[in-house]
Structures are given as C-alpha cells and as structure tokens.
Amino acid sequence: MKAVIASLIALLALPLIAGDIHGKVTAHSVRNSADAIVYVDKIAGKTFPPPAAHAKIDQKNMQFLPHVLAVVAGTTVDFLNSDAVLHNVFSPDACADHFNLGTWPQGQSKSFTFKKECFASLLCKVHSEMEGFVAVLPTPYFAVTAADGSYDIKDVPDGTYTVKVWHPKLKAATKSVTVKGATEASFEIAK
Amino acid sequence: MSMHRRGLGFLCLLSALLIFIKVPSASAIPAFARKYETSCQTCHTGFPKLNPFGEAFRLNGYRMPKETEEQIKIKPVSLGAEAYKKMWPRAIYPSDLPGQVPLALNVKMASVYASSLDDSGHTIVHNDFQFPQEANLFAGGTLGEHMSFLGEVTWSENPDGSSSTEIERLHLQAGSFIGPEHLFNIKIGKFAADLDDGFHEMWLSTDNGVDNLFTFNPIGLHGGTGLSDAGAISLPVNVKGIEAYGVAKHRWFYTVGVVNGLGPSASGNVDGNASKDVYARVDYKFGGMGLDGDSTGVTLPPENWRERSFRVGVLGYHGNGSGVDFPLTDDTGATVNVQDRTFNRAGIFASWYYDDLNVFGVAMSGRDRLDTFAADGSLSNAQSFRYNSWFVQSDYVILPPLQASLRYESVTPPGAAGVKSLRALNASMAYFFYANVKTMVEYRRDLSESKNYQLSTILRFAF
C-alpha cells in the first residue's frame, strides 16, 4: 500500500521535476572560455523574487573577484575591500543608475541593489585598470562558465526556453532549448 | 676644392662610400617575436627581409592582421579597463602597454676588403675587421587599440675609432582610428618614409651596398657630383614629419607625407627654410596575400616566403631648397653659393614574386633647379639638371637557410656635370645559422673600373 502511495506521489510530482542545462561555451579570439554567462531568458508569466541573501564581490589584489557575477534582478551585492589600499566601485551604465559608492578602506564593504536587468560594468576610480561585471538577469537559471567553457545550470523545470550567452568581450548568442531532465546545449561565441 | 670631380676622383669617392656609407635601416625586431612567442620567420623571409605577412604586420601598425587576444602571449599591462571607454571624455580613454620591455638589439660585424683607385691612379686596398660595425637598439610595440611605436638608435664605430650615435627612427603612429580598417593611418616623428620603406627587399638581402636611390648629390656647378653620403639630395632615407598611409580593398596602397626639407639652416633650424617637402606614392598588388594580410579567395603555399604576385607603384617627391646655401668654388676660384631651389623625384616601383624568386626594382628620374649666387648675393646662374637612377634586384630562396641575391644598379648624372655614370653589380649569398643569426658574403663591383670592388663578409645577429 505504501509503495502505491509513493508511486502516486511521484507521478503527480513529475511535471515539477527539475532537470539541468549543461554543456560548453567555446569562446573564440580570447585566451580562454571563462566568464561567459549562460542564462534562461524571461519566462512568460513568471517572475522571480530576489534572494534575501546578498551576493558578494571582493576587491582583492586590485581585482574584482569574481570577475563576472550573475544575479537575479533585485539582488543586493556587497562590495568588500580586502586590499590595504582604498578602493572605489562605480558603474558607467545607465541600467545600473550610474551608481558610485565612493571609497572605503580595507575590511569594509558597501552595498548596491541591482533592480533592473543589466549587464553592468564595474570600475574603480582609484585603479583604472580594475574591471568587473554584474549580469542582472530575469531568471535565477544561470551559470558562469569555467575556463574550459563548461557550465551547468541546475534545477531548471522541464520546458522550452530561450537560452542566451553573454560575454564581456564577445557577441551574445541565443538558442531555444527544450529541457527534459539533463539537457545538453553548447554554444560558440566570437567577436 | 673644386666641385669638378671627374674620373678617378669620383671612383675614389665611390670606393670610400662603399666602405662607410650608411644604408637605410632595416628592422629585425625580436621584441615582436617575444610578444607573440613566434619565430622571426613568421614575418621574415630571412631577417630583415619581410615576407608578405611581415609587410602586412608592418602596415598594420606592428599587429597581426585580424589579431586576437590569444595570439598575444605576453599579456599587455592595462592602463584602463575597457569599460572606461563609456566614460570618455570624463575619463582618460583606456589603453595598455607592452607586457615586457619592448627592446631588441641587432648587431652587425663586417670584414671588409675593398680595392679602389686614388687620384693618381694607384690602387688602394682596405682590409678592415669592423667588429662590430654597428649595433641597433630597437623599440617597437603597441599602445592600446590604435597606437604603436617604433624606434631605432644606432651606435656605429667610425674608422678613426670614435663612435657615433644616432636616433635613426622614432615615431608614434595611430592606425584605423577612423573609417574602414586599414584605410587611414598616420605617423609622426622620425621614420623611414613609406615612400621607399616598402622597398624592403632592396636592402635586405644586400646588406652592404651603395643604394643609388638615396645617395646622389645633385649639387655642383654643372649639376651634381655623383654619389655622396652627407650631401645626398635624393630620396630620403629617414624623414622628420607627418605621414598618412593606408590600404584600400586589400590591394591598393597609398601614402602621402609632409616632412622637413633640406637643412640645417645657418640660423640653426633643422629645416633650412619655411617650406616643407612633400611626397606621395600609390601601389597596387596583383595576386598573393593582400597588403593588409587578407587571403580571401587566394590559395597561398605553406612556405610563407612564397607567393605569386606582382606589385607596381608610382612615387614622387617634391622638395624646396630655397635659402639653403651650398658653398662651392667655381672655375675661376671664386666662392659661390648654390641652392637647390626646387627638386622633384619621380619613379616607378615593381616587385614580382614567383615562388622562391623575387625580382624587383625602381627607376627614378630626378630634376634639380640649381640657382648659383655670387659672393655679393646676386643670382649669377639658374639652370635645371636631370639625372636618372635605377636598379633591378633578384632574390632567390635556394633553401630556407640559404638565400642568394644579385643586383644591378645605375646612376646617370646630368651630362653637363661631367661625372661618369655609375654601373655597379652586387652579388650576395646569405646563410642563416638560426632564424636570428646569419652570415653573408657579398661582392660589389664597379662595372666601369675593375680595380674598384669590395668583398664583405658579414655576421649579423638579433635578440
């Protein structure tokens, strides 16, 4: 009897079973295939509340770490300064309200909430070579590629989606992907 | 001294030139090999002669055609993040500089055996170990997305043991910053004008010869004294000025330049008068790799010195030497001043590649309007004189390490000058021990006087 009930529950839950989208992004004309963001674009009729937990970017050894961060719209990002020198964070992009958080010393952090979808550049006025990116996305289904281009977006409900790839230096790519369990989708991007 | 240098005197001068004249600089710049971690032979048939890809690299501002980030093995140092472009002009436009010190050294050693006749008809023999003859310190690289630079400081040892140092080239250039890619580039500084810099082949396989296009001296009571190192008014080896150049539709090349003219002036200015000299050149290349490195629709052999192509171009230079005095002693013993009031050079260039063979040459005609002023400043004579010079050279890659070259060159001074024509033959054989170490044996012979010849053995290396 218990087995029957368990089977019925499993059967009812089937449409809700999440799969994943995984694969490789091959980035041409750059040193490696890291830092591309693969994400599921807007899903009609669905909105996704931002997480309560803040995301974090560290400024360490004069670099933004991670170099590319993906968040869902509405997420607050904390910018920590781990260096012994002053750092600043600002964005030249209108979609990020041209924010400028001023300067602050080691061990402290300042926050900014990215309300709108955006691919925001992060710059430091004190060290003009520093550069980072926050990709503010419409869904929580995203992943950042490793150096070999591999990525894995977990817990994507079965269905058909528009999947996009964004890269700081290369042209974007788009593909329609039907997710059914573990689904593979690979991309090539170039200048 | 009378400016009527005739016969033996001229030959003696020629032989002196054979030994000590400065030939145009030719680049072999291992700084680029370091940057891209690639062999010299990527760009050179055998250094410093450029292959078609090397010519595209040079014209592209010392960048690979269609260069990608991954080709640059030594990561440049950022002088501003890419996103700072969005901030301009509220922030300085982002750039970068070479990740390593972009310096390289070329060293040339020569053993020179030269025979010539003096004024009294006696044979004079020179046998010099010029170890080293010269060393060239190169700096070359890129600055950000559009700018690049090239510099060359040459240290050379004089026959008397003294040495001299010269900034042969030092220029900044900006490329493809407006309009279609490759179409408009501009350089400023001291540089080898693209008017003649594209004749790389000319001095690349023959390292130690008089180059007849650059060394004719038209100053004289009757229109010139033949070849001269210091007094040459011909095509310029290096210029100080501004030049625009570009490549259109992969195969057209053009250049125009505005440069300092004759000088210095008596008052010490670099340019001897208020006028500037101007030059222009237009080429077209049939077949082979495009001048911008494009190879669309062309099948090129893997041996990158080979191709089948024909490049042809016309060139012209206009100079104004008004106010720049060249003091001479006339036939009566009186001192006069000659000014090269206007001088024009017009020429045609052609280069034909057929696999391992490259035949090329230039024919040029020069016209000088010489004004002669008496000691009291009055104009005593004004006449125009014409001279002609041309050369044809054949280079052949026997095997990649073994390359041969044969050149015939001719200068015909104005008939009134009474100076003999020069007919010279230059044969050389180069052997590359490594891509950056070569030795050459070169024989040069004055075809009108068998006692005038020179045999040089040259060792060059670059690092």
Image (spheres, coloured by chain):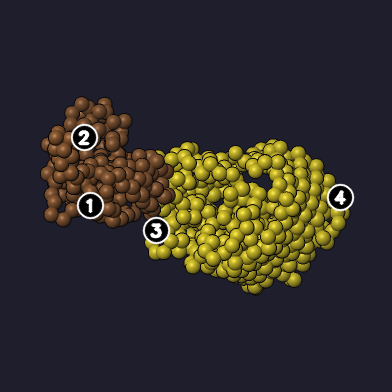
Q: Which residue is the site of mark 2?
A: A56
- Label 2 to label 4, Cα distance in Å? 86 Å
Chain letter, colour yellow: B
Kindly tell me whether residue A69 is visible in this rendering.
Answer: yes
Name the foreground residue: B289 vs A83: B289
Name the foreground residue: A42 vs B57: A42
Q: Which residue is the site of mark 1?
A: A159
> What secondary structure is found at the residue carrying circle 2?
strand
Q: Label 1 lies in what chain?
A: A
> What secondary structure is found at the residue carrying circle 1?
strand
Q: How many marks?
A: 4
Q: Name above or below for residue A84 compared with residue A135.
A: above
Q: Label 2 lies in what chain?
A: A
Tell me if label 1 and label 4 are in contact, CB under 8 Å. Answer: no
Indicate which label's residue lies in the foreground, 4 or 3: 3
> What secondary structure is found at the residue carrying circle 3?
loop
Q: Name above or below for residue B454 compared with residue B77.
A: below
- Label 1 to label 2, Cα distance in Å? 31 Å
Kindly tell me whether residue B88 is visible in this rendering.
Answer: no
Q: Residue at x 71, y 54 (%)?
A: B397
Q: Residues within 10 Å of mark 2 (few under 14, many from 20)?
A: some
Q: Which residue is the site of mark 3?
A: B177
Indicate which label's residue lies in the foreground, 1 or 4: 1
Amino acid marked by disc 2: Lys
Q: Which residue is the site of mark 4?
A: B123
Q: Label 4 lies in what chain?
A: B
Amino acid marked by disc 3: Phe
User: Looking at the figure, which quarter contains the C terminus of chain B?
Assistant: top right
B382 sits to left or right of B414: left
> What secondary structure is found at the residue carrying circle 4?
strand
Q: Name above or below for residue B22 compared with residue B132.
A: below
Q: Residues within 10 Å of mark 1 (few under 14, many from 20)?
A: few
